[in-house]
Image: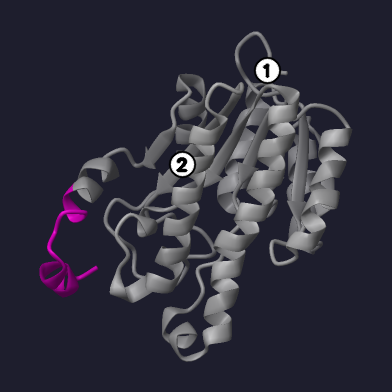
Amino acid sequence: MKDAFGAPQSLLVLGGTSEIALATARRLVARRTRTVWLAARPSPALDAAADGLRALGAEVRTLEFDALAPDTHEEVLGKAFTEGDIDMVLLAFGVLGDQEHDECDPMSAVRVAQTNYTGAVSAGLICAGALQGQGHGALVVLSSVAGERVRRSDFIYGSSKAGLDAFTQGLGDALHGSGVHVMVVRPGFVRTRMTAGRDEAPLATTPEAVAEAVERGLRRRAETVWVPGALRVVMAGLRHVPRPVFRRLPL
């Protein structure tokens, strides 16, 4: 259960090596989160992430989770929920892919879609059901502004995030009144290992800034969080730009 200050005491991270997820976990551990589950494919990076959080005083356990193996999700994620209530689930896995390559290799494009959307639908529904069974908890899903208006330069990734965003909004509506808080987070360009080497977009941000926005959103029980907040206005304008004009924009 959340403590007297509203901070989650237990956290399940799907995508346990994500820089944004780990920045959020560190922030929450500093605020009173005591138990953290990191779900990801086994790797030295996952081990290092767990050790880093343990050094901050958290009890950390790892789960062998693969977004591309939805038939295993119920069993794997169920292990965390059978150990006790989970106050917050952070769904933070995803891949950017390589747009130029993926357009010529449909199976690579499918892998992006299956990771970012199909895998998230499976894991999201399983966690949502478990949270609903508890009668409390928060499901926070990392989406992207890329899904708000899909660009020519990354339409495979953007379309997968558009699907994830729509799914999360619908799931939030389905769970309204159940005691489960669903929040979608829409960051812009985030400076991480995943975006290294790519041209930086305006209003670029950091994992730590996203983590801070997530924490604020949880306190306000927000349904949608933009990072940075100015992107809400920017995207509101871009959504209404006619397609012939949008095609010519340097995006």
Q: Amino acid at mark 2?
A: Gln
Residue of label 2: 169
What is the crowding at mark 1: few (fewer than 14 residues within 10 Å), some, or many (at least 20)?
some
SS at circle 1: loop
Q: How many numbered marks have been drawn onto this rendered protein structure?
A: 2
Separation (CA) of disc 2 from disc 1 = 24 Å
Q: Position of residue 143 (x, y in %)?
A: 47, 51
Q: Nearer the viewer, residue 244 or 24?
A: 244
Quarter holding the C terminus is bottom left
Q: Nearer the viewer, residue 231 or 237?
A: 237
Q: Amino acid at mark 1?
A: Lys
In front: label 2 or label 1: 2
Q: Is residue 45 positioned above or below 63 on the image?
A: below
Q: Name the side, left or right, on which 3 lies relative to 83.
A: left
Residue lying at the far front in this picture: please name it.
174
Q: Is residue 199 positioned above or below 76 on the image?
A: below
Q: Is residue 1 positioned above or below 64 on the image?
A: above
Residue at 61%, 65% (x, y): give it: 115
Residue of label 1: 2
Q: Is residue 202 magenta?
A: no
Magenta-tinted stretch: 237-251
Quarter holding the N terminus is top right
